[in-house]
Image (cartoon, rainbow, N blue to C red):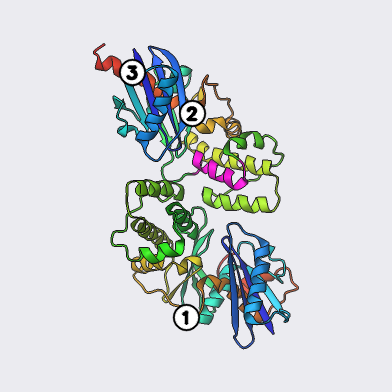
Amino acid sequence: MIYAGCDLGVAAAKVAIIDDNGNFAFDIISYKSPIPQAAVDAMVNALAKAGLTDRKIDRCLSTGLGGKAVPYSDGVVPDTICLSRAVREFNPRVGTVINIGGQSTEAFNIDGKGGVGESAVTDMCVAGMGMFIEVIANALEMPLDELIRASLGSKNPLPIANQCVVFAESEVISLINEGYDKLDIFAGVASAVAAKIAGLVRRIDVIEEVALVGGVAKNSIVVRNLEEKLELKLASFTGVDPQVLGAYGAALVAREGCDLRSETISMILAERFHGRRKQ
Amino acid sequence: MLVAGCDVGALTTKAAVMRDDVLLGVEVVRSRAKAVQSAFDVMDKLLARLALSYEQIDYCVSTGYGRSLIPFAHSNMSEISCHGRGAHWLVPSVRTIIDGGGQDCKALRVDKHGTLVDFRMNVKCAAGTGRALELMAESLGVDVSRLGPLSQEASDPIILNKLCCILTQIDIKRLVLEGRNRADIAAGINESAARYILQLVRGLGLRKDIAMTGGMAKNTGVVSCLEQALGTGFVKLPVEPDVIGAIGAAVLAVDGFRKSSGL
């Protein structure tokens, strides 16, 4: 049987395809604003990568901000459930998950039964989210990958005073005009974002190992800063793109099976996985 | 006596020139990266129009974020004092001034002489500022100047409940994709800006008359939201609302000149 998960987020559509034997294929399509069509395109690409273009998907679940808009989905699963499921699959020792999405940042513990325990979320301010880094990278007029790679060697990260990205953007532009090095500026921004994330994580009782998921997990300079600030080594996932974990988790939940005809799937799942978290 | 005021803002730079107690002219230009450049831009333009030269200006007060860098200014004052003084000079009954600037928004109180008594302003967050409005308008695909007129056509304003304008941008893009009415979104944008300005005004306490200054005052949608929430109309200022800081600086330059020449 073939199962799929689609995570339609703020910045990208992610699709993961699995079968009963643990084979795994995925695709990611990034965009500026969420488009349901991207979910379709990512699915087509992922099927091609899996070599399954002529096969029918037996069950597909969706998650993320645009989960409801995925046209081929059999049901929507909360992203915390997908993530805790996927993270445990790759690394059963993980106790705390930090998920940095485009539109929210959250830290939660996985309880003994694999459900979601204590959690902290921020979704009012972009400080400490992926979007913050994107806005600044835009102002620096350099591709993000290049900025990340090159700024890892920065010796003098510049402190960024502003927490608000709108103000930080003007601050960064002034710094460029004053002749400061773009890489030192970016290293300072990475440190500021990591500090903000660490502040959120400290609101819960962290259980090691700690996993970082979401697009920002690919940003090695933020990862390094976050490890320094939390004074721990983040769990590594070999052989999986951290951005695709939500979609992978949705596929795992699809494989485990649940009553998909029911419209209250998320409630059933919440009962099953959420434990003491309030709906 | 010929005096000038120069207000170097985050988005626009403004200048005003007065002879004694008469306003001769005002000018607005888009700010450039360096405050000094912007200040010379606007002064060059205004002085050329009035057929005056820098040497003829007896006293100049600068204000705004680049105020300490302006070579032709004799002294500088905070933009808060300048907005208070400017609005009070134009309409002496004014006691509360709501100033919606490019990167800040503030509410201030002046006494019957136009002297600053108390104020509140945004510190950490860009919500409720001109820049936030501009970004949100961009996501809607309209120029920021269209937000006011467009919102008047709204029948069912959409509530945008996120504090952060960058996150609101994402919401707006989604609403546009969903094909929601643009006028309703525009009204939601104005309402969200008004909501944060209102917090500042409530913190200060309300005393009439109220005037609104800064570029935000040009947005009829934000103004009517505020008037409705405060339950009172704003007084009409006889000039464009973005030049009031510069006029206030010029009025303060009159004081400065008198003081410096021992009058």
Q: Kindly state the secondary structure of the residue where label 1 is placed.
A: loop
Q: Residue at x 46, y 31 (%)?
A: B29
The residue closer to the viewer here, B221 or B8, is: B8
The residue closer to the viewer here, B29 or A234, is: B29
Residue under disc 1 on the same chain as residue under disc 3: no
How would you classify the magenta stretch by its main secondary structure?
helix
Q: Give the letter of the chain under mark 1.
A: A
Find out whether the residues at labels 3 and 2 contact each other: C-beta distance under 8 Å: no
Residue B232 locus on image (x, y percent): 58, 26
Question: Of tags 3 and 2, which is closer to the observer?
Answer: 3
Magenta residues span B127-142
User: In the rendered view, does A182 fall on the left or right side of B136?
Assistant: left
Q: Kindly state the secondary structure of the residue where label 3 is placed.
A: loop
**Structural distance between the alpha carbons of marks 1 and 2:** 57 Å
Amino acid type, mark 1: Thr
Q: Residue at x 35, y 57 (%)?
A: A188
Residue A203 locus on image (x, y percent): 43, 63
Residue that sits furthest to the left in the current view: B262
Magenta highlight on residue A254: no
Image quadrant holding the N terminus of chain B, namely top left
Q: Residue at x 43, y 28 (%)?
A: B14
Residue A238 image label: 1
Closer to the N terminus: mark 3 or mark 2?
3
Residue B57 image label: 3
**Structural distance between the alpha carbons of marks 3 and 2:** 22 Å
Amino acid type, mark 3: Ile
Q: Kindly state the secondary structure of the residue where label 2 is placed.
A: helix
Residue A203 visible in the displayed image = no
